[in-house]
């Protein structure tokens, strides 16, 4: 493939927007010679100082407070959305109408129906899409996928996925937009259960039916100052408070289409795990488990005829595993969160450069949304619900 330059416009220059900008810039360094060059053309943020700071520190040619400027810029081929969730539909509509390819952070929509709407908009416009299900790109997860696809674990029987994070465990944690139903939509269902569900789809396949419940443990939080801090920031005991309007916890029992059984669980108010995106998977011939808090390790059980070696083996990351050598050449030299985002950005750039769909796309986000719609129905019915299609023929 001849060298191809792709112009990048990033909308939303908070922490995640900055991560994306760095990832595009570093993709060429980590994957030299692939023929694709990402150019940071323009960024936008409603807080001007944040937009200008991103331009100065990250290397954008231009910064603006008007997100439509990003879409209207003639040198932008990729629109990267890292805004609060309530803006996603409007931005996707504008970007798709302009023929721009779209990267959108999860959750794609504030609700399953909104995700279905967004997927239909992009599909009808014929633009390529990608979604930030970045945990797929950890080298040890990619190795787990290789083992599963090669049949090393046999028939899959049980899957347990979870995402436990303490970011909402402090009652004095600020009432950021993530706790506001109007802006974020659902709480942990979209924010972190989305990763659990996507990972299960990636490794174990589609979900047939489920039963679910949800709960809000911390009902009010200190009000934030607009434009300052992150969703990890902390207020004072006497600060004015507002109501939390979405859920802190979601759990589900699931039955997969392939007959496997399992559990999904997500909590932002749990006390203990810091950032535990993890899964355990069992088959008829083997088993494995992975935990993002130890992302450069995997526990693997593939027994043989020697009972003296019967037990889990700890695999340690190294350049024998997918993409690891792009970052560190030696065994035991660990990768981090932003390295996964660089691998993610590289895959999207390759898809756009070759003008062919990549994954995870809005279609994968829709599959996640269909599972979440069944969870929401189960919260009301109190019983098992089938996972059904939300795909729209029209937006």
Image (cartoon, rainbow, N blue to C red):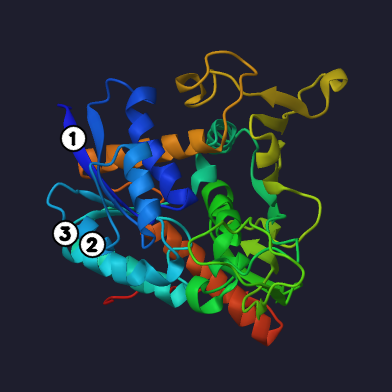
Q: Position of residue 285 (x, y in %)?
A: 71, 36
Which residue occupies the extreme right position in the image? 308
Of 10 and 199, nearer the camera is 10
Sequence-wise, which precedes: disc 1 or disc 2? 1
Disc 3 element: helix
Which numbered disc covers residue 5? 1
Residue at the image position 20 percent from the left and 55 percent from the top: 100
Q: Is residue 220 visible?
A: yes
Where residue 383 sits, quadrant-wise, is: bottom right
Q: Is residue 359 left or right of residue 223?
A: left
Where residue 222 sits, quadrant-wise, is: bottom right
Q: CA distance from mark 1 to mark 2?
A: 19 Å
Of 83 and 339, nearer the camera is 83
Q: Position of residue 166 (x, y in %)?
A: 72, 55
Disc 2 element: helix
Which numbered disc covers residue 72? 3
Pointer 1: residues within 10 angstroms few (<14), some, or many (20+)?
some
Query: Nearer the viewer's eye, disc 2 or disc 3?
Result: 3
Determine whether label 1 and label 2 are within 8 Å by CB: no
Disc 1 element: strand
Which residue occupies the extreme top position in the image? 330
Residue tagged 2: 95
Q: CA distance from mark 2 to mark 3?
A: 9 Å
């Amino acid at each position: 493939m001849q060298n191809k330059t792709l112009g990048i416009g990033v909308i939303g220059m908070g922490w995640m927007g900055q991560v994306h900008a760095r990832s595009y810039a570093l993709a060429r360094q980590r994957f030299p010679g692939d023929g694709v060059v990402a150019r940071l053309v323009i960024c936008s943020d409603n807080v001007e100082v944040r937009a200008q700071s991103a331009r100065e520190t990250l290397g954008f040619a231009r910064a603006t407070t008007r997100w439509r400027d990003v879409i209207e810029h003639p040198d932008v081929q990729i629109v990267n959305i890292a805004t609060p969730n309530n803006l996603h539909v409007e931005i996707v509509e504008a970007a798709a109408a302009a023929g721009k390819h779209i990267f959108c952070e999860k959750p794609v929509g504030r609700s399953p129906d909104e995700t279905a709407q967004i997927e239909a908009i992009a599909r009808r416009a014929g633009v390529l899409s990608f979604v930030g299900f970045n945990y797929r790109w950890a080298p040890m997860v990619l190795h787990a996928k290789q083992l599963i696809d090669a049949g090393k674990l046999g028939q899959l029987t049980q899957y347990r996925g979870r995402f436990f994070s303490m970011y909402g465990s402090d009652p004095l944690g600020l009432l950021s937009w993530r706790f506001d139903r109007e802006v974020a939509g659902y709480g942990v269902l979209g924010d972190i259960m989305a990763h659990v569900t996507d990972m299960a789809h990636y490794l174990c396949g589609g979900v047939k039916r489920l039963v679910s419940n949800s709960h809000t443990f911390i009902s009010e939080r200190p009000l934030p100052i607009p434009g300052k801090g992150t969703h990890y920031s902390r207020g004072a005991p006497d600060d004015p408070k507002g109501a939390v309007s979405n859920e802190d916890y979601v759990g589900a029992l699931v039955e997969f289409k392939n007959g496997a059984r399992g559990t999904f669980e997500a909590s932002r108010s749990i006390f203990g795990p810091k950032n535990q995106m993890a899964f355990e998977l069992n088959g008829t011939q083997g088993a494995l488990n992975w935990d993002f808090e130890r992302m450069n390790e995997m526990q693997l059980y593939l027994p043989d005829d020697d009972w003296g070696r019967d037990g889990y083996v700890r695999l340690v990351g190294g350049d024998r595993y997918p993409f690891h050598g792009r970052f560190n050449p030696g065994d035991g030299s660990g990768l981090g969160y932003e390295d996964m985002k660089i691998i993610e950005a590289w895959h999207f750039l390759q898809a756009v450069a070759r003008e062919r769909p990549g994954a995870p796309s809005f279609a994968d986000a829709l599959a996640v949304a269909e599972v979440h719609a069944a969870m929401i129905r189960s919260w009301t019915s109190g019983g098992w619900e089938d996972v059904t299609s939300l795909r729209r023929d029209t937006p």
